Image (tube, rainbow, N blue to C red):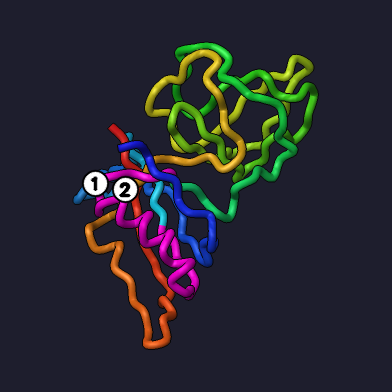
Amino acid sequence: MPTIDMPTSPGISVSRFGLETNTRRFESPETKASQRMVLGGARWIATYSLPPMKRDKAANWQAFLLKLEGGANTFNAYDPDAVNPRGSAGGAPLVKGAGQTGNSLLVDGCPASVTGWLLPGDYIGVNGEMKMVTGQVNTNGSGEGTIPFKPRLRNSPADNATVTLTRPSCEMALIDDQQAIWECNEVGLYMPKTFTAVEVFS
């Protein structure tokens, strides 16, 4: 089944969105000296809360959650508090050169000679992955810039792959099969609804 889009109305009232990093710590039982390392598999986790609503508005959200069939299907998840970048953004950025890996990406197709094209805390989407920018990105006279981000790339994007700046998203699935249960009172008002999902990838 194709990845599903969340309804846009009514909007999410409260969100909890962040990165679960996958790390390992080794500590000596004798000296307590420690070593730490970052492993692959960092993933985004989201908890979304919806406001109280009547059935005419709740129905779209109910249908969305049912289409997910518990954790079987996936949806396009994003941070609703950071849909647009803080930087000036603009242009039509593309990956400049194949084979790029790690925690940065060289792009072109940006406006030329811009200071603060992207700012720390902005999101980008590339190759089906969602990243948070960790430093200010300036562009040169050719409209090129290097974007630093976390988490690191899982797969190397193709040359000229599109870089999304507005509402970047990642693929998430509900954490269990009970996320679609609702409460409604005697006057037909659906109570605030919260559901949690985690990024999935192969």
Question: Which residue lies at the image location 70% right of the left edge and 24% below the top edge?
Answer: 110
**Cα separation between marks 2 and 1:** 7 Å
Asked whether 191 or 141 is in front, the reply is 191
Name the amino acid, label 1.
Answer: Ala
| Amino acid, disc 2 | Ala
Task: Count every numbered label the image shows and give the total.
Answer: 2
Q: Position of residue 65 (x, y in %)?
A: 34, 57
Assign a secondary structure to mark 1.
loop
Q: Looking at the image, is 163 positioned above or below residue 132?
A: above
Which residue in the protein does label 2 denote? Answer: 173
Residue ID for mark 1: 72
Residue placed at 79% from the left, 17% from the top?
141
- The answer to whether residue 39 of the structure is visible from this angle is no
Is residue 64 part of the magenta span, yes or no? yes
* Left or right of 199, for residue 99: right
Q: Is residue 107 above or below residue 10?
A: above
Where are the magenta residues, as a range? 47-76
**Crowding at label 2, few (<14), some or many (≥20) Cα neighbours within 10 Å?**
many
Relative to residue 16, is residue 52 depicted above or below? Answer: below
User: If the image is split into quadrants, where does the C terminus sit?
Assistant: top left
Q: Label 2's element? A: strand
